[in-house]
Amino acid sequence: MAAVYLGDYEHPLHTYARWGTWAFDASGWNLESELLQVNSDFEGLPVRDVETITSDLREFCEKHVHRQPHQYWADPTERARAYVGRHNPPWL
C-alpha cells in the first residue's frame, strides 16, 4: 500500500495498492508512474512524496484524520472483493 502527497498538503490525497511498478486503485491496474502523473495533473500539484504504508488501517486513518473502519456505514469488504475480482492483475 502507498499514499501520495501532493503539493503542500499535510495528508495524502490518494492511497493505492502497489505491486512492483504497478498500482491498483479505483481505476484498476495501471503503471504507478502513470497513476502519479494523472493525480498530479488532475490536482494541478506536484507529487511531493510517495509513502509506503507500514501501519495498520486503524493507525493510518487516525494519523491522517480519516474515519475509522468501525465508522463506515456498512462493511465494504464484500463490495471491495467484487471490484478487485473484475480486474486482472499484471502478473496473469
Image (spheres, rainbow, N blue to C red):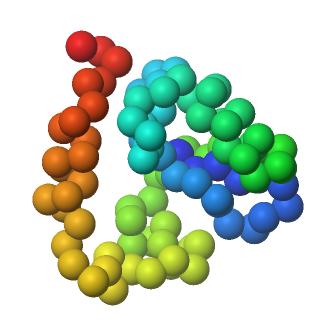
Residue in the picture at 20% in, 58% down: 79
- Where does residue 75 sit, x and y in percent of width and height? 19, 73
Where does the C terminus fall, quadrant-wise?
top left
The answer to whether 6 appears left or right of 26 in the picture is right
Where does the N terminus fall, quadrant-wise?
top left
Residue 58: quarter of image: bottom left
The answer to whether 40 appears left or right of 64 in the picture is right
- Where does residue 62 sit, x and y in percent of width and height? 50, 78
Residue 59 visible in the picture: yes
The answer to whether 76 appears left or right of 6 in the picture is left
The answer to whether 80 appears left or right of 53 in the picture is left
Residue 33: quarter of image: top right
Judge whether 1 appears above or below 38 on screen. Answer: below
Q: Nearer the viewer, residue 19 or 86?
A: 86
Residue 48 visible in the picture: no
Residue in the picture at 48% in, 27% down: 30
- Where does residue 36 sit, x and y in percent of width and height? 66, 36
